[in-house]
Amino acid sequence: MSTGKWTDPSVPHRGWQFVRIYDLEQPSHTCEMCEAATVRYVHEMFHPEYGSLDVGCICAGWMEEDADGAVKREADFKLHLARRARWLNRDWRLSANGNEFVNTHDGFNVVVFEANGTWSARFLHKRSGYVRFSQRPYADADAAKLAAFEAMMHYKHATGKRGRA
């Protein structure tokens, strides 16, 4: 860590907190900490005495003093993106009502439906009986499917119901 802000004593080198991670879809951002690495997956880090920096995985690990945690976070994020990309290509079937639906291996039933010119979704976790409907209208079926995927992943994370979608 001998380049960029790592060499600047006025920039804190420890005590940073992870804010979020996002994908630029190609390596196109220069890490704002080392100012050398070009990254695709950007970790937004925050320090109360400095503010925010958008950095790569290695610098994020050093800044939060958890290199393994930063690597795992990025791997989990990549896995989530891959699952999300495959979600639309699943074997969606038509219900008796003419709505597209899919049943997942881990006990979810997801349905998308059109009402009044907009699209909505509903997922049901069959084992627990938990049901959730989309909170907003969507322009098309694919947008509703992706919203249902994100809501389902949030539910799985919040309840500890791991597994593949």
Image (tube, rainbow, N blue to C red):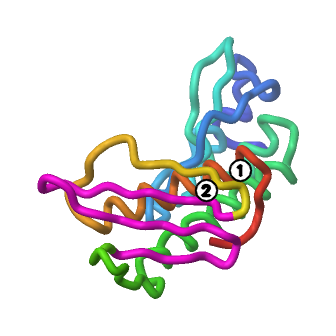
> Which label number is shown at residue 153?
2
Residue drawn 68% across the image and 21% down it:
47
Span colored in magenta:
100-126
**In magenta segment, residue 60:** no
Vertical relation: 81 (above or below) 19: below
Residue 88 vs residue 52, the one in the foreground: 88
Residue drawn 51% across the image and 59% down it:
123
For the stretch drawn in magenta, what is the main secondary structure?
strand
Q: Is residue 66 left or right of residue 113?
A: right
Q: Identify the residue under disc 1.
A: 157
Which percent across, then down, holds residue 153? 61, 56
Can residue 35 be seen in the rendering of this structure? no
Amino acid type of disc 1? His
Residue drawn 44% across the image and 57% down it:
122
Q: Is residue 95 left or right of residue 152?
A: left
**In magenta segment, residue 110:** yes
Q: Are marks 2 and 1 in contact (CB under 8 Å)?
A: yes
Which percent across, then down, holds residue 159? 75, 47
Q: Is residue 13 left or right of residue 116?
A: right
For residue 41, which quarter of the picture? bottom right
Q: Residue furthest top?
A: 49
